[in-house]
Amino acid sequence: MHKLREPRVFVPLLLLLVLALFPILLPDSTYEESVLIACFLLAIMASGWNLISGLAGYVSLGHSVYLGIGMYTGAILSKAWGIEPMYLMPLGGVFAALVAIGVGAIVLRSRSHAFVIITIAVLWSVQLLAQVAKPITGGADGIVVPPPAWAKELGNIPYYYMFFAVLLLTILLAWFVMNSRLGAGLVAIRNDEGKAASIGINTTLYKITAYALSAIPFGVAGALYGQYLSFVNPIGAFGILTSVILVLAALVGGRGTLWGPVIGGFIIALANEFATVSAGGVSARVLIMGIVLILVVMFLPAGLLPTISAAIKRRREKGDTVKFIDQTAIANSRTEVDTSAISTRMSTTSKVENILEVRDVVKTFGGVRAVDGVSLTVERGTITGLIGPNGSGKTTLFNCMTGTFTPTSGTVLLDGENITKDRVWTRAHEGLGRTFQITRLFKSMTVLDNLVAPLEKTSAKQMVAGRYSGEEVDRAREILDFMGLSQFEKQNAAALSFGQQKLVELAQVLMLRPSIILLDEPASGINPTLIEKLANVIRRLNEAGTTVLIVEHNIPLVLSLCSKVHVLAAGQVLTSGTPEEIRNDPLVIEAYLGPDHLLEAPSV
């Protein structure tokens, strides 16, 4: 009940109540009802589009294709079965989703501008298909849908409430997705798709699922919209202008939010109606929509709701003092925590002695052999170092181990199993975790969100689970406490210092319960007061059963932590041995300092 008193909750509910009572309060308002139906339709489409483009960041400019698919599904089946299209709305949604799964499996392989262009091509291709498939679609002549028996008596009122109901269901769908693990994964993909895969998110499955869900409201509304218009033809069903307007609606309101696309839908639909009535003609409408788009990009790039929210937040925080963060306090925070929170999922009783093994791995980029026939092993339960001068191939080798790069040749074994061709998220599920040289946290998400986003496995149950439900939240808080970062759980990750972000990224990996962690220069850029904290964390993880492979230029840190060290130079293993052997090896000294250090100083 307390949440209902918050303006962000009761204001939308109050407006929805007003819309529900509108035909009752103003019974003779046929024109106004038709305008609001247009608002409902655009809000439905903008909210559906928001699931793939707002949350996952894949901007589709041809998404109105699924409205047309819903329209034709209703019209064709209505003609064949003698059933009014409004009763076929669920089938419109199902068919749109099935088409979206097939299309998404192909088009979602592309990104950025290529994805935008391909979605437009899909829209035009389906429009052309509808024109040439005349026996089924009626071709350019279209399909006439007879009005229902109650059309003369009741007018737009039944349509009004049906579109209103579809809008409510679409808002509920959007709310459910945003508050699920699926929603958290989609936002992670929007922030950094490669990083999302590395923490166990099956990015392909998540994107296709979101794409299919985004098509459902279009298909449902399309079946009803075809009957409302009483006519379906290729140009009207698959118009590019519809796609542009619905994208503009989401941008105006604020994509990635729950209510932004709804509000934007109403604003743009009313502006479109004003342009039609006042200026008349398609050219005037396009001109006015173009001006609105320019103004939004220039002055409201984040959208109306996010801009207002940011202004309110700045006003509330005005005059607040900046809280001093004592890095020493973080460094001296306890590293004792319930072992179950940081323990590995993998059995430590495996008969395979080497948990990670690389055999003759080669990775070439054109004519450059970044990794040239590397073979090395990491023994279970150890802390192993991987050092070498800049450009020696350390990070490239890490990427081959984790699946970011596919080796040109060679084999990678994890716990005795060949994982060379496994997907990145599959390796994460199998117990291989990693951090990055330059931290890749999801900057638009809070620290706690960053920790609950990782997935130990992919399943339907995990995807539909609540974003903050289950034991993951408790474990996340325990790990943050272990890292000395409890006070930052509600802070945006982008607001933390670089060193703090490094610790959060390590905490994020621990949520996967990895059996081995690959740390890529963890001490780089960290406040010196935090380096000893980092070393203690690594030792404590190792004591809890986690194997560690660490790439680091801080040689004293590596030698103090590791029981074995591999040295890379020019993409090859130069030598391997204990820290003492590596410290005094002339080949290692020469690789770091160069051969010139052996020359005598010139006489003066």
Image: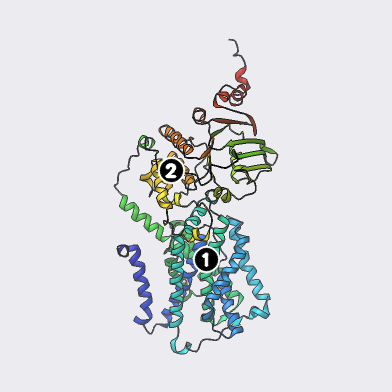
Q: Name the residue under label 2.
A: 339
Q: Can residue 101 be seen in this view?
A: yes
- Image quarter in which the N terminus is found: bottom left
Task: Please tell me in which quadrant of the rendered image residue 591 appears.
Answer: top right
- Image quarter in which the C terminus is found: top right
Task: Please tell me in which quadrant of the rendered image residue 278 appears.
Answer: bottom left
| Amino acid type of the residue tagged 2 in the rendering | Thr
Q: Is residue 258 left or right of residue 120?
A: left
Name above or below for residue 209 compared with residue 77. Answer: above
Q: Where does the image place residue 88, in percent across and percent down from the top left?
A: 54, 79
Task: Please tell me in which quadrant of the rendered image residue 124 appears.
Answer: bottom right
Q: Name the residue under label 1.
A: 214
Count of numbered badges drawn on the protein: 2
Residue 61 vs residue 355, the one in the foreground? 355
Residue 583 vs residue 366, the one in the foreground? 583
Name above or below for residue 240 compared with residue 552. Answer: below
Residue 586 vs residue 14, the one in the foreground? 586
Q: Is mark 1 on a helix, strand or loop?
A: helix
